[in-house]
Amino acid sequence: MDAGTLRRKIGGKWSGRGGSWWLLVTIGQVRGVARQMLNGEARFAAVVAAPADAGALRVMWHWDVRGTLLSLESILPPGSFMPTIADIYPGADWAERETRDYFAVTFEGRESTPPLMLRASDAPGILLASKRARA
Amino acid sequence: MSYRIPIGPYHLALEEPYKIEVECEGETVVGASLKVGFNFRGIEWLAQHKNITKTIALVERVCGICSNVHSMTFCMALERIGEIEVPEKAKYVRVAIAELERLHSHLLWAGVAAELVGFQTLFMHVFRLREIVMDALEAISGNRVNYSMNRIGGVNRAIERPDRVLEAVAEIRRVVTESVIPVFTTDRTVAARCTGVGILRRADAIALGAVGPVARASGVDVDLRRDHPYLAYGDLDFKVPVQAGGDVLARVVVRALEMLESCRMIEQAIERMPAGPLHAGDIYAVPPGEAIVRAEAPRGEVFYYVESDGSDTVARLKIRTPTFLNIPTVQAMVKGNAFADVPLIQASVDPCYSCTDR
């Protein structure tokens, strides 16, 4: 399945910017879209998180379809949880653990989320601390 | 009765630390878990505290083998945000360096694989070839590891003696064709160690997100240089080797054939290199914006997300290296294999823990 067909199948309002096709989704839509990506043989590429306004976090999932990048974006309000997609895409396991290391995101639905880069005794969210320091 | 064998994080024959815990029944592996992070340097954090010029040098140190692809991809992301036009000549120089780096990486891997198979003569033979590539890169850049070729909007220097690069490429192609490929594909020792060992099924490769030679050896026909051409790759003729076997031998064959394709690409890049400037001038910041740029590193797709707030320091940098996705595939590859094959199987991924940990 090519990227255009997969986008149409997933539906929603996709927009092209910065080297990818983007779809803004709610937290509740993330897993459903991930399943559609897998059915379309999209290759999981990355999870990226970045601070947004008012303490929220932008969480972005990226998939490759024959050289074209498809990206989901969702806004995570402070104190909220993000659903895991690691049971759908095992390749997302490390990406979610690293996102927890960097931004203290809790991914719901996982048995556990051990740190990937940090030590077990380290507090997660090292890039959140970084943002505060810069501000 | 099953038992667990912890290996690492420090290894006798590998400089980089990681831990693999293997669960066996008899001598058969039934599961494995990996632990990384021993080499974590917080490069993404550091990048958000240094100016962009320093960050180019910083990201070149993500990896000691594919150093160039990191500075190149980072610069390409900034160029996309800033809509900076890179001179044609610089694109060709970048391609030549990127493919020389791929030759270096694949030869290094072939040497390590030969040693793990128990073929010391082949290891020496391959490492002699690797020296030729490193000499060529040193002649161009003055350095054998961190070449410092990239800057925002182009490259720092030209290839002053293209004739010497072409000589080096001709010698590498000759030896790879006449001895490296025949030995790796016909020698009984190599075949016995590699055939049917460490199979990664195509569906697992997709679900785990495998990239580069690991994916292509499992029948996943992906290569950004062809599928999403960047720099001057769209102007070059080359093939993307793909194997369906998914075993260690398939990964050997894919990398061996890729070396020949890299030789073709370097020759074309040098022969077709246009005249003109090397860069777009001195650029120390880009306007606010975000960009994702991916490049085909020797081990597979490298992914950069860059967010700029318009200052001379990036607001967010995310680096996802190929090994970050490829290493977890080892857990699928080792199941059902003999414990003695675990070192070779994990090496067949061509792992880089420095890249993974950043």
Image (cartoon, helix red, strand yellow):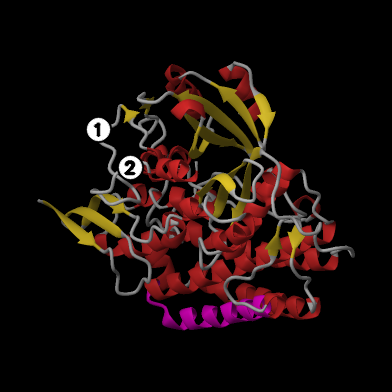
Q: Secondary structure at mark 1?
A: loop
Q: Look at 78% across and 56% down and name the residue there.
A: B236
* B40 and B15: which is toward the camera: B40
**Residue behind mark 2:** A124
Q: Secondary structure at mark 2?
A: loop
Question: Where, by quadrant of the figure, is residue A109 drawn?
Answer: top left
Q: Which residues are magenta?
A: B117-138
Prevalent SS, magenta region? helix
Q: Is residue B250 left or right of residue A113?
A: right
Q: Is residue B121 magenta?
A: yes
Single out the mark in the foreground, 1 or 2. 2
Question: x and y percent of residue B88 in the render?
Answer: 83, 57
Whether residue B336 is visible, yes or no, is: no
**Residue behind mark 1:** A111
Question: x and y percent of residue A52 in the render?
Answer: 51, 30
Whether residue B103 is visible, yes or no, is: yes
| Residue at mark 2: chain | A
Q: Look at 53% across and 27% down and name the residue there.
A: A73
Please say if A2 is above or below B19: above
Q: Which image quarter holds the N terminus of chain A?
A: top right
Please say if B81 is above or below B217: above
Question: x and y percent of residue A99 in the render?
Answer: 40, 40
